[in-house]
Image (cartoon, rainbow, N blue to C red):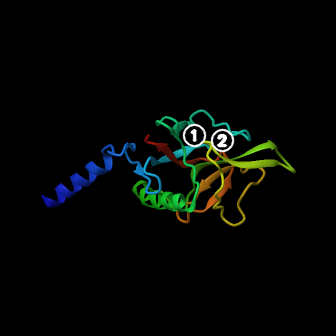
Amino acid sequence: MLLFLVFTLFVGVYSAPASNGCPDGGVQSSVNSSTCYLYVNGSFMHLEDFGGNSPPDGAEDYCRKYPNGHLASISDAFTNKFITDYLQKVIVTFGADPRSLVWIGGYAYCTQVGLGADCNWNWTDADNFSYYNFENGSGYEFFDTSIAIKPSTGKWFSENGKNLYSIICEMTTN
């Protein structure tokens, strides 16, 4: 009986809307209390072109379904660590591989593509892109203009935006 009560309480807490304004399954940031993150297990494209446009039903469009929602932007090491820890915990729930990649909101905006490309990293929510956590050897490459995070390490990888990965959304509660 006690085991049933504990199980019922756990399931109720896990599936009930959070009192902090985060969506079901989301978590409130310990870095910024007005921010929530939500991992969405699935297969989403990030961006469809070099101009930062999200395809219909793509990752950014999905996150925009939430109030003030967008793909997660990571502005410092504390936020990167919080998101990495959250992903490591929640991915186990879905039975996903923590070595697989998850889209975050970084992308390269290129005014010219090809040899001598002129590209700058941006966030889909227009936050200042001043913190970098790329895996050694990763960064802007010709067709790899979108950023994914590896939950097992917290390192970022530039990837082709048409690759299909799960996503992490960010939303503000205020």
Q: What residue type is labelled 2?
A: Leu
Residue 114 vs residue 78, the one in the foreground: 78
Q: Is residue 116 left or right of residue 143?
A: right
How many badges with numbers are in the image?
2
Residue 74 vs residue 113, the one in the foreground: 74
- Give the mark nearer the N terminus: 1 vs 2: 2
Q: Which amino acid does label 1 sit on?
A: Glu
Q: Where is residue 21 in the image (x, y as percent from the top left)?
A: 37, 42
Given the current orientation, which residue lies at the most extreme right position?
115
Q: Where is residue 23 in the image (x, y as percent from the top left)?
A: 39, 42
Q: In this view, does 88 lie to the left or right of 5?
A: right
Given the current orientation, which residue lies at the most extreme top position?
56
Tell me what residue is drawn at x 32 percent, y 45 percent: 19
In the rendered view, tell whether residue 173 sits above or below residue 56. below
Q: In this view, does 95 lie to the left or right of 12?
A: right
Please tell me the numbered disc located at residue 47: 2
In the rendered view, tell whether residue 34 sits above or below residue 76. above
Tell me what residue is drawn at x 64 percent, y 52 percent: 147
State the image quarter where residue 56 is shown.
top right
**Marks 1 and 2 close (CB-CB < 8 Å):** yes
Q: Where is residue 89 in the image (x, y as percent from the top left)?
A: 42, 60
Please tell me the numbered disc located at residue 60: 1
Q: How far apart are marks 1 and 2 (CA)?
A: 8 Å
Q: Position of residue 135 (x, y in %)?
A: 66, 64
Please tell me the numbered disc located at residue 111: none
Q: How crowded is mark 1: few (under 14 residues within 10 Å), some or many (20 or more)?
A: many
